[in-house]
Amino acid sequence: MPFFQYKAVTPAGEVKEGVLEASSDAVAIARVRDMGFIPIRAQEAGTAKTPEGERRPLFERKGVSTNDITILTRELATLLKAGLPLDRSVEIMISLASTPRVAEILKAIRNDVRGGTALSRALDNQKGIFSRFYVNMIRAGEAGGSLPQVLLRLAEYMERAKALRDNISASLTYPAFLAVISLVAVVVLLTAVVPRFKPIFASAGKAVPFAAQAVLWAGDVLRNFGPLILIGIAGLLWLSMRRLQDPHVRYRVDRWMVTGRFVGPVFSKVEMARFSRTLGTLLGNGVALVSALNVVRDTMTNAWLAEAVAEVGRELKEGRGLGRPMMETGRFPPLAVHMILVGEETGRLDEMLMQVAETYDREVEIAIRKALALLQPVMIVVMALIVGFIIIAILSAMLSVYDIPI
């Protein structure tokens, strides 16, 4: 069985470290609990930091990642749930910080908390680190006296979002690798292999078929202007990014992404799942619907849908509810809107919103899997056609030059 290095806290608030043998990290955590400690972290000994000499990456990160915040959230929830005071919990987390930057942020939060500042205000003081959604969730937990439970829900929310991103990234790895290999193969053929046939065709003194001329021309262009082509592509990408910073251009792009014939259904479901999960999480933790909708609007990445959410918010203030204004905008999936209407009628809006999020998360995952399953053979066929065209063009030219009947 592997060995696990654990970090835990005693009931008195003292940090303990040690190594134990267990079949999995869950078993290791259970054994730490049996010892009377509050488990914070359990890692396999080969990947964890050792007391004698801490392993550090070659290049240390200077920023704070979403994963760092997720870990902090779950650890703080664990410590508070165990009954430790807030300032002592943050003090313990400083010693567990994964990077100096995280430790620096935690020290600032601890100093604010010890000075009498609420945790939500202390987090908000760290500009650009914690989102408005995150801070409002903490504020709702403080108001309702359920901060540990809110932190746990936040951690689960962030872990679920990370799992979806990781799943998409993992699914795109092989197609991306295949695309790069295909591009490299075509470039090598055109720049290193095809030019070797040019002197043969020139010495023969006969007309070369059009297909072979096109292939030879493409090879010459890549060899002579390859760096300029790369610079041009980089310039177009930079210009596109600059154009996307224009609110009017971004609005049109966001609208196309949701309403487009091929990509629209998937992106619409992704945005609806994010909208529903965020709003449902806020409502489930006691945030008023109007305030929660304002937070959701500010956290949305799609400007076209954010405009619709703003319209719904104005209608909501006039007492028209949530579902009817959403349906009137025509920008949200009908199934989701009908489920929200049912949630309003039954008084279980937060639960129904979470159900909408889970439904669309599953549909998005299935759609992405189908698209990627189709993408791989399509890429292979396209690659085969391009390489086949190059080979056939050169071969037909060779046969034509030497008067060999095809």
Image (tube, grey):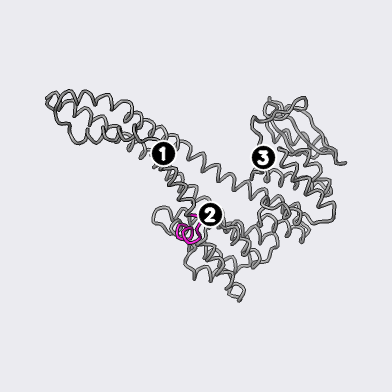
Q: What is the secondary structure assignment of the residue under circle 3?
A: loop
- Where residue 31 sits in the image (x, y, percent)? 77, 34
The residue pinned by badge 2 equals 359
> What is the total number of numbered labels drawn onto the structure image?
3
Q: For the C terminus, which image quadrant?
A: top left
Residue count near mark 2 (Cα–Cα under 10 Å), binned few <14, some 14–19, many ≥20 = some
Q: Earlier in the sequence, mark 1 or mark 2?
A: 1
Residue count near mark 1 (Cα–Cα under 10 Å), binned few <14, some 14–19, many ≥20 = few
Q: Nearer the viewer, residue 5 or 234?
A: 234
Of labels 2 and 3, the one closer to you: 3
Q: Is residue 30 left or right of residue 256?
A: right
- Where residue 174 sits in the image (x, y, percent)? 46, 35
Q: Please name the amino acid that badge 2 sits on.
A: Thr
Up-down relation of residue 28 to residue 160 (above or below):
above
**Magenta stretch: residue 251 in it?**
yes
The residue pinned by badge 1 equals 230
Mark 2–mark 3 distance (CA, rounded to whole Å): 37 Å
Q: Earlier in the sequence, mark 1 or mark 3?
A: 3
Mark 1–mark 3 distance (CA, rounded to whole Å): 31 Å
Up-down relation of residue 277 to residue 397 (above or below):
below
Up-down relation of residue 225 to residue 272 (above or below):
above
The residue pinned by badge 3 equals 62
User: Start and end of the magenta stretch?
Assistant: 244-253
Q: Which residue is depicted at the point 67% across and 48% down?
A: 155
Extreme-right residue of the structure: 12
Q: For the N terminus, which image quadrant?
A: top right
Secondary structure mostly seen in magenta is helix
Whether residues under marks 2 and 3 lie with C-beta atoms below 8 angstroms apart, the answer is no
Q: Quadrant for residue 313, please give it.
A: bottom right
Up-down relation of residue 2 to residue 280 (above or below):
above
Q: Please name the amino acid that badge 3 sits on.
A: Lys
Mark 1–mark 2 distance (CA, rounded to whole Å): 42 Å
